[in-house]
Image (cartoon, rainbow, N blue to C red):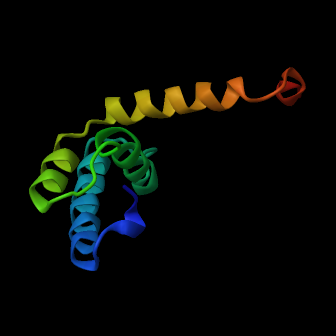
Amino acid sequence: MKLENLNPDLRCELEMMLTLKMKDFRSNHFKAITKDQVIQYLFNVKWKRHDKLVTCDIVNDIFEVTASQIFDYLRCEGIKMATKQKLEDFSD
């Protein structure tokens, strides 16, 4: 499942819910989290095995996602990316 595969109405609802979630993160002083990072987390973790998404799933999953889950996801992605690099890539 990818963002491009969603119908326009569902994509619009996703954007609206993400905007509300980003306001929530900002009000809790998590300014480093971006909307793209939340989208990546949702599609790569929460919705990875879904063939079809419905509005109630989108709403529930977005409002339930925590900053901790996003940070853990980003940490794991960073580790995965680092394992694909050579030791020389880490030199100053």
| Number of numbered discs | 0
Q: Residue at x 31, y 68 (%)?
A: 6
Look at the image and tell me in which quarter the C terminus lies: top right
Above-or-below relation of 61 to 68? below
Outermost residue to the left: 56
In the rendered view, does 43 fall on the left or right side of 28? right
For residue 51, side relative to residue 85 (left or right) = left
Residue drawn at point x = 22 percent, y = 59 percent? 20
Tell me the quadrant of the picture where the N terminus can be found.
Answer: bottom left
Please, is residue 73 above or below residue 10 in the view? above
Task: State whether residue 8 is above or below residue 30.
Answer: below
Asked where in the image residue 90 lies, by quadrant, the reply is top right
Q: Residue furthest front?
A: 51
x then y, percent, for residue 44 = 41, 43
On the rendered structure, is 36 left or right of 13?
right
- Residue 73 percent location from the top left of the image: 43, 32
Q: As rendered, which of 28 and 77 lies closer to the eye?
A: 77
The image quadrant that residue 54 belongs to is bottom left
> Which residue is pictured at 19% across the width and 55% down the height?
58
Q: Which residue is located at x 78 percent, y 29 percent?
A: 85
The spot of residue 76 in percent (x, y) is 51, 26
Q: Position of residue 69 (x, y in %)?
A: 33, 31
Q: Residue furthest bottom?
A: 8
